[in-house]
Structure formats: structure tokens, C-alpha cells
Image: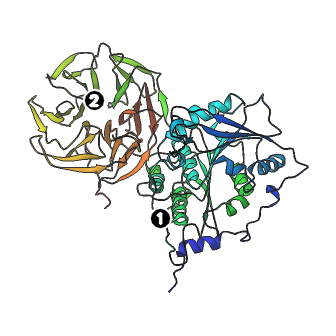
Amino acid sequence: MKQTLPALLLLLAAAIPVAAQDYALGPDSQPNPNVPKGVVTKYQLAPGKFYPGTPHTYSVYVPAKYDASKPAPFMIFLDGSGSLGNGQRVPVVFDNLIARGDLPPLIGIFIDPGVLPTTPENSATAQNRYERIFEYDNISDRFSSFLEAELIPEVGKKYNLSKNPDDHAISGVSTGAVGAFVAAWHRPDMFHRVLSFIGTFVSLKGADTLPAAIRRTEPKPIRVYLQAGKNDHTSADQPFGVFYGGSWPMNNQVMYDALRFSGYDVKFNLGEEGHNMKHGAAIMPEALTWLWRDYPKPVVAREPAALSKPDSGWEPRGNVFTVISADKQWEQVGGSYGAVSSPAGDKDGNVYFADSKASRVYKADPSGKVTTFRDNAAGVRAVRVGPDGRIYAAKATGIVSWGLGGDEKTVSAGVSASDLAITAKGGVYFTDPAKKTVGYIDPAGKLKTVYSGGEIAAPSALSLSADQSMLIVGDSQVRFNWSFQIAADGGLANGEPFFRVDMPEVSPASGVAAVTVDTLGQTYFATALGIQYCEQNGRCAGIVGKPARGALTGLTFAGKDLDWLYATEGTKLYRRASKMRGVAAWSPVKPPKPPL
């Protein structure tokens, strides 16, 4: 019995008007003698840092209306020669749409993938190394870094390019579509518009993981046009795909669903073709017009409309906008410092944070004014505020506390501490990174080691659960973070690698640098990818974007109502309004039963 395409795709195909199946190029893809024509010039990009020994051929389209005195918008096309060719005719489309005002007078950059040539002595017997898959079908930030550091500056030497990401678009075909989307995904500060044709968002080199990441990650200001073919790598008797990577059209649908779920401005056009550009070339004018519509109005991240409709049937559980708002972004507090970390809030809404380079502890009041709280504070790795109102500091040489008047007390000398968690009763937990242990100082000052199991690769951060019945231990090396039950004597029992965070593509470390919790019992981890928060049941539900592009070094809820997220990153302290409320050491909260 013959199988048919999945019902989902059939319904979608029926819902989208499709051109005639020959997909002839329309009038906007035909040369018009009455339209001013741009000029295409070919160049060679010398080998650089990101693809050593590998040159790249590229061409630049300059519109007839180009004004060198003004920064010009631009659009990058991967597999550039194909876009320039008679099949797609992008320069012709540009000429027509620019003349009509449907596109701004933009510069087109058409780059081909690199080819590493053989050495001269092996040229007759050896094969070149073809870089296309490595460059494009790659979910790391290498290709976006190449564009930022090598290609765009080189083109910028010849033409006046805008630096506004709203003026930048990027397009790709097949594996190139992955390269285009991932470039914008990693660098939304560079690209706000993505055009994807027959994208290979399948299990080849990790692109199949993108939909899950899109659903969990705070939306980025990116507009996306997706095109796919219903018969791409499928057949009548194998409608779920004939290639080991999976089904091209189905995975484009999954990408589309994920983007819509997260509130992106996205359009999906599913045609009848296979893995070719017949349909894509025919709709090129439509796709470009949609992508650049309303220009120069900026592309912004937005919250899904369904989130505000209680009766929509849309399940908001875990959505990142249950934690933060799209229109309330990170704001910097104070200026730039040496190397800041470990923000901690007090009962009055003040926030204390350490600066290891300046050997100081600073205080930021609720208005954002920053003053020096403690000078000559060498070696401070972390600060916390105790239930007694004192400021506790973890050092390599011990743990101390300071009163607001400046007096210092030794909590425990001779221990090496990198992070602290302080109970409502005055007990202090601390991590010892050198010994890979967790220590505990009871309210009477008695010291003991409560974890030395060796299963935690790098115990880097601590937090008590909202009700203080559990101790959460972050691990900066691996993706699993631990939950321990706290015994009556402060000891730890029944430990499990309970929380699983997402890892960066090219780093062996999760980068967990801090942990904090909210009144729902959700746990927040400052990681290399951003602020990942896990439901009380251990599932990580979302990722709040980092304030900038550096490594997070601290995280806490603070403010008078504990409804601000404070984070340290590099040399700066940031804060962001939150829809959740944190839990203070002096006021434990029993959270509701977790969703299961």
C-alpha cells in the first residue's frame, strides 16, 4: 500500500498558495531595460584565522542608487555564485525591487565556501579540502566570527557599510541555510533578517537541535523566511525521508513551529519541489520583499500573542516570558570595574558585589548608585548577605563577615572557599574548588566536610532551595548539577545529578558560575549559554539571554521585593526586572508542588 506525506505537511501545503509547478521566474526576476542596473564585481578574500590556508571568492553587488556618503544596508548570500547565476538572478531581482522601493538600495555580498588547496608537491595526487560543510553546516559561532572579523571588514574597506543590525540580512540554501540562520542566532547584534531556502535542519551536524534551543531560549530580534520543498529527500513510499539525516520538509516545519511558539516574526512557504531552487528562485522577489518590509522600522523581539490570552489553549509553562518581559531588557548598573562577580542583595534592596582586580567590594543602592563598601578586600571570590545583615565573603584563605559599620569577623580561617550559601539559622556552606568538596560551618562555628564524593567534577556554585531543605551544587565542567537533602546536623544526603543544563557547542564546560532560586522553587544557573532556569522537578525550561557576550560570573535576585535579576559579566553589573521573586537567606519559602 502506498504511503502518503504526513497529514501535517499536506494540510500546510493546502493552506499556502503555490505557484504553477514549473515555477517560472516572474517579471521581478527578468531584466528590465527601464530600471537602473547595479554593478557586480568579483574579489578574492585571502586566508585568515578562522579557516586557515583557505581563500574565499566573493562578489559584491552595488546598486545604481548607492551613495558612498551614507552607510548602506547589506545582505550576504552564502553559495554566492549560485545566487548570482541565471537560475536565481538575485542582482536582477535587486535592481527591480530597489527601483520600485520594495528594497532599500542595499549592497549584496555573495560569498562562496572556501576550498583549501593541496600543497604544490601533492597537487597531482591529492584532493583539496572542501570547506562548505564545515563552514555552513555547523552550529558553532565560527562562521559568524569569520563574517564579523574577516569578510565584512574587507568589504567595508571598499564600501560604506552600515553597522546597524536592522540593515543586515543573510541568506543561504540547503546547508547554507543552516549557516545563515546560525550566524544570526549567535549574532543578533549583526543580523536581524534571515532568508532560508530548503534548509537542512536535520541530524547532520547538530542543526536538528535548533528547534529545541529556539523554544527554550529568550527570543532574539530576528525575522525569518523559511522555504522548503514537500518532495525534498522524500518519496511516495518513504514520506519520512530517504536520507540518514531525516526529513527536510518535516524539520523545516518543526523549525517554523518553534519560531512561532517563541514569538518570532516568521513565514514558511512549502512548495512542491525537491532539493533544488526552482521554487525558491520563483519566490525570491516575494521573500525579499517580506524580509525587508517596513524598513527601516527595526526588527524587535516580541512576546507570543497567545501568552496574554488565557483562553487560547496555549500552555505557557516554562516559557521564558513567564520569567522576564521582552520590553524590559538588561540595564547596566554603575560603570566599568576590574573583574566583578557574585552580586548579593540585602533587606533594603542594596546589592554588594566583588571586584577581584581592584580588591574591593562595592555596594549598589536601589537607584543604581554604586559606592565602595570595602576597600583592601583582596582575594574575595564571593559575597553573600546573611540573616544577621552582615556581609559574608569567601576567600582562598578563609571566610569572613563584615558589619555595615566596617567591623570584620573571622567565620573560618584556613579554608579555601569559592562560593557560599547561608541558612536562616546562620549555618554556612562553601565550596572548596581545589579539594572538590563542600564544607559546612554550623551556627556554633564547628567546621566539617559534608561532600567529598568526587562525582562533582568542579563544584563551582551553591544555593539553598527555596525552603532550605536542599543544597544545590553547581558544576562548572559538566551539564549535571546536584541536589542534596540537608540533614538535621547540616550534613548532606541523598545526592543526585538532578538538574541538566544545555552545553555550548564548542566548549567542554557548562560554565556554571552561580545558582539562585525563586519562590516557585525554580533554580537558575548562570552558564556559558545564558541564565538557564530549571523547574523544581529538574527539567531546564528556558534560557534568559546574557546582558552582553561575555562570561557570566554571578547571579542573584535582589531589590526590596526580590524581583530584579542581578548579574555580573566581565567588568560590569547588570539588572533586569523579573516576573518572579527570589528567596532571601533569612526568609525561606515553601514552594508549591512542582509540575510533573
Q: Position of residue 109 (x, y in %)?
A: 68, 41
Residue at the extreme right of the image, as rendered = 34
- Horizontal side of 113 relative to 549 (left or right) equals right
In the image, residue 592 lies at what x, y percent? 29, 55
* Horizontal side, residue 519 vs residue 318: left or right: left
Q: Is residue 387 left or right of residue 140?
A: left
Quick one: SS at disc 2?
Answer: strand
Q: Please state which amino acid type lies under the numbered disc 2.
A: Val
Give how far across and how far down residue 527 sits, in percent.
37, 40
Percent x, y of residue 455: 18, 44
- Disc 1 residue type? Gly
Query: Residue at 41% across / 38% down in the picture?
Result: 565
How far is mark 2 from mark 1, CA to CA?
Answer: 52 Å
Mark linked to residue 246:
1
Residue that label 2 marks: 385
Q: Nearer the viewer, residue 141 or 525?
A: 141
